[in-house]
Image (cartoon, rainbow, N blue to C red):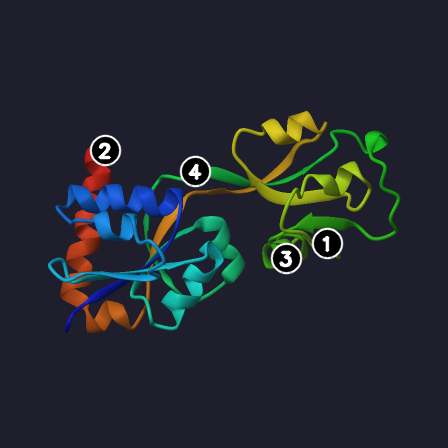
């Protein structure tokens, strides 16, 4: 179908909140909300196609143009570093990207010659400490990042923080806040030209829903 807009979403909270917004625009999201084993779900009436992918893959699909729009966390967007248009801050999924560790060096079990950072955001870490002229060794982890300082694998961690309860339970605290994060609506640069009218209408509709919710 011509002029079909494709949106890349990750299953979970970001997708559910996106469906909630789209439904307020009168778009039926029952099929993508319950896709079964389908990875591509279409709504012919709304001329929308949804592709359901991993969160970290959303920027890739949008960048390569197989998705016109995507909803992704700012942390994932920073890590991907792809040339996408970040058109709206959707506001949900709010958290902070922070450096965390022991409040006092004396409490740390780490004794490395090189400053070590445990994180699942290696690109963000290189950029952040590089801008300060500091050389770091990155320990890339994808689960229980807080273990880094606790077991002496790293000096600090770079990770998203919501309530901070896990940090507190492990004797750690936020040392520096890198940036606030939330879900962002991103679009492919070419798509914004080739589907200009429909894209702008959809973006404007989402923006109006967000304003009404304020």
Question: In the figure, residue 209 lies in which quadrant?
Answer: top left
What label does residue 7 carry, if any? none
Q: CA distance from mark 3 to mark 2?
A: 35 Å
**Residue identifier under label 4:** 94
User: Counting residues from the N terminus, which is met first, the one under dot 3 or under dot 4?
Assistant: 4
Kindly state the secondary structure of the residue where label 1 is placed. strand
The residue most toward the front is 36
User: Counting residues from the N terminus, which is met first, the one under dot 1 or under dot 4?
Assistant: 4
Q: Locate residue 18 relative to residue 93 in the image: left or right.
A: left
Q: Nearer the viewer, mark 2 or mark 1?
A: 1
Q: Locate residue 37 relative to residue 191 in the image: left or right.
A: right
- Residue at 26 percent across and 70 percent down: it is 191
Q: Locate residue 159 relative to residue 140 in the image: left or right.
A: left
Q: CA distance from mark 3 to mark 4?
A: 21 Å
**Coordinates of residue 33 in the picture (x, y in percent):** 29, 48
Kindly state the secondary structure of the residue where label 4 is placed. loop
User: Counting residues from the N terminus, which is met first, the one under dot 3 or under dot 1?
Assistant: 3
Kindly state the secondary structure of the residue where label 2 is placed. helix
Q: CA distance from mark 4 to mark 2?
A: 16 Å
Check whether the beta carbons of the residues at disc 2 and disc 1 lie within 8 A of each other. Answer: no
Check whether the beta carbons of the residues at disc 3 and disc 1 lie within 8 A of each other. Answer: no
User: Counting residues from the N terminus, which is met first, the one under dot 2 or under dot 1?
Assistant: 1
For the C terminus, give its image quadrant. top left
User: Counting residues from the N terminus, which is met first, the one under dot 3 or under dot 2?
Assistant: 3
What label does residue 122 carry, if any? 3
For the N terminus, give its image quadrant. bottom left
What label does residue 213 carry, if any? 2
**Residue identifier under label 1:** 139
Q: Nearer the viewer, residue 19 or 191?
A: 19
């Amino acid at each position: 179908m011509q002029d079909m807009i494709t949106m890349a979403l990750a299953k979970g909270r970001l997708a559910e909140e996106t469906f909630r917004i789209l439904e307020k625009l009168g778009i039926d999201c029952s099929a993508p909300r319950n896709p079964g084993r389908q990875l591509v779900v279409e709504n012919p009436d709304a001329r929308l196609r949804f592709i359901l992918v991993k969160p970290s893959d959303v920027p890739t699909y949008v960048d390569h143009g197989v998705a016109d729009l995507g909803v992704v966390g700012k942390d994932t967007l920073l890590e991907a570093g792809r040339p996408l248009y970040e058109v709206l801050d959707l506001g949900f999924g709010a958290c902070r990207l922070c450096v965390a560790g022991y409040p006092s060096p004396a409490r740390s079990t780490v004794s490395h010659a090189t400053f070590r950072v445990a994180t699942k955001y290696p690109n963000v870490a290189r950029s952040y400490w590089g801008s300060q002229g500091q050389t770091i060794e990155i320990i890339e982890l994808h689960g229980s990042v807080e273990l880094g300082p606790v077991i002496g694998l790293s000096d600090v961690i770079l990770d998203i923080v919501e309530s901070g309860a896990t940090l507190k339970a492990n004797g750690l605290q936020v040392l520096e806040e890198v940036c606030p994060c939330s879900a962002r609506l991103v679009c492919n640069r070419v798509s914004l030209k080739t589907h200009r009218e429909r894209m702008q209408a959809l973006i404007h509709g989402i923006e109006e829903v967000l304003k009404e919710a304020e």
